[in-house]
Amino acid sequence: MLSDEKLAQQILSGDTAAFEELMNRYKKSIFTIAYRMMGNYHEAEDICQDVFITVYNKMYQFDSSKKLGPWIHRIAVNTCISTLRKRNKVVAISFDETYVPGNDLELNDLYEDPHLIIERQELKTEIESALMELPESYRIVLILRYQLDLKNQEIAEIIGISRENVDVKIHRARKALRKTILKRWNGGELKNELPAL
Amino acid sequence: MNCQHYRDLMFDYFEGALDSPMQDEIKLHLCNCEFCRRQFELTEQEDQILKDTSDIPEFSDAFNSSVMAMIKAGAGNSQIIVMERKPRFRWLPAFSKASIAAILLLSCLYVPGILPHFQNSKTPQQAALIKNSLTPPASILPQDSIKEKTGTKQLADLNAGAGIETQDALKKESANDITSSSEQLLQNETQPDVFMAKNLPDSDNPSENGTQGGTAPAAGETSRSLQSSLRFAGINNNPSIYNIPDGFVLKETNNISETQVAYSYEDPSVQKSFVVNVFSANPVAEIKAAEDQSVIKAKEPKTIELDNIAALNNKSNRTIEYNGAAWQITVTGNMSQEELDRIAGEISLEPLSSQP
């Protein structure tokens, strides 16, 4: 099987079959990113189309000394953010740090009686809903890390930050996710006897 | 360690980022602390759900074809062209770009008409120099070469040898423009805008046409095309050839370079043909001839197929002085040396502009 980078060369020489092969390799992961980010099928499909057309048009900008996967996923992430900005009008995203520790609500204050024995499906629904409530920068790192099962170094290449920063961001995203879940369970009310994470 | 510390390590625990003793210590703590155990269980469930992609809908089968259709419809074609061009120029260092610009500028300076005074100014000393310089070494310049020309484009050199080798440097156009087959020659004859100086004597002087050995002129068109070719070729006055043997018809005139014009004659009844190469003599021509030779030395010979002039073996040289300038004449053809010598000896030149 040809490497991604070889495929890129063939695409540059006008080989449309190579581009189809590239689509087959990446459409699932791109659709996953788009679907989790947008939360609906049709928008995700539109984004996938936009992503692949952008990939085709910008292929000449691809640095063949690097890996193609992170480059394509980065286009997907940027396209999702761009679409969300258009949809929500105002979405300020910074990958450097959007989650300020000082502004963290203490989970101790949120959690009362954790109903830990719940149905898995209920939890899944809660987590998915909570995920959609997270800031986009957190949502993206969680999607890349868990849905695409990428390494932190690969995530760093995609979103353009250091691997250490990705480590921190994933950790904070998980905490934010937990906080959101607990908030939903407790109807958004702050409680005093909550366990810390 | 207290519970908070263990919970801080919870994500690392599920990431497998902790060493074995620490993992054992956490497990031991979870056995003893129900609250922490619940937290860990919740985190584990979160992990599993976050990794679960089973709810991602299946992709539409038509997705690939729809994207490809959009690309073929023009969503990406132009950029593909750009993607091949851009890096090419990015790699060029600045001095290369400057060199190309300088070469283009110098080329423009040599185009006749831009600096016509260079070509018209002649002194006896210059004429003598030209006379000496316009006889290039046979090993370098194929004097028996012919060049085709279609429209305003200068075409291929050709030579008379059986190997049909010629020098690339004399070409002003790319090899794609070179048409050498007899079929293309035939096509050229049928195109009205093709430069085909069938008859060198100008139509302004019809009385001389019949007596000088040429066939009837093409009523004015020849004159215009010839004038056009003169500007193009760099020979201010493309010389006319007179006293051509009876039966020979001018097939075409080719401006090989700025210093050389080739006239191709043919007698279909006896299947003989010869080519008269005339090397002009003026200061610009002298410079150009020297430059051409230096360039030719650096170029590899290029083979051109010529079906209809395969047997131009012999040649005869002669220098004609006319109007204060020296004109080197080379006659090449598929006939005996004696015949060629006779033709070369009888040929006369008269610049077009000097005709009454």
Image: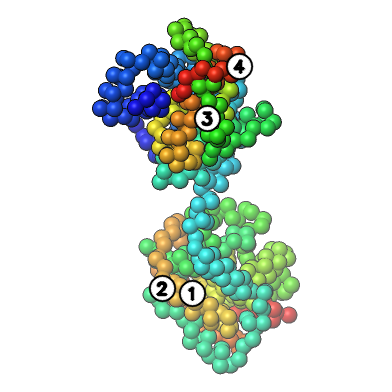
Residue kind at label 1, given as amino acid type: Asp
Q: Eyeballing the image, is B141 above or below B186?
A: below
Residue labelled with disc 2: B297
In the rendered structure, the answer to whether residue B95 lies left or right of residue B197 reads left
Mark 1 or 3, which is nearer the eye? 3
In space, the residues marked 4 and 3 are separated at their CA atoms by 23 Å
Whichever of callouts 4 and 3 sits on the residue coming sooner in the sequence is 3
Residues at marks 2 and 4 on the same chain: no
Q: Tell me the element at label 1.
A: helix
Nearer-the-camera pick, A4 or A15: A4
- Residue at 64%, 86% in the rendered image: B121
Q: Is residue B94 visible?
A: yes
Residue kind at label 2, given as amino acid type: Lys
Residue kind at label 4, given as amino acid type: Glu
Residue labelled with disc 4: A189
Q: Eyeballing the image, is B272 above or below B36?
A: below
In space, the residues marked 4 and 1 are separated at their CA atoms by 92 Å
Residues at marks 4 and 3 on the same chain: yes
Name the spot of residue B155 as percent of width and height, x first.
54, 61
In space, the residues marked 2 and 4 are separated at their CA atoms by 91 Å
In space, the residues marked 1 and 3 are separated at their CA atoms by 70 Å
Residues at marks 4 and 1 on the same chain: no
Nearer-the-camera pick, B54 or B319: B54
Residue labelled with disc 3: A138
Residues at marks 1 and 3 on the same chain: no
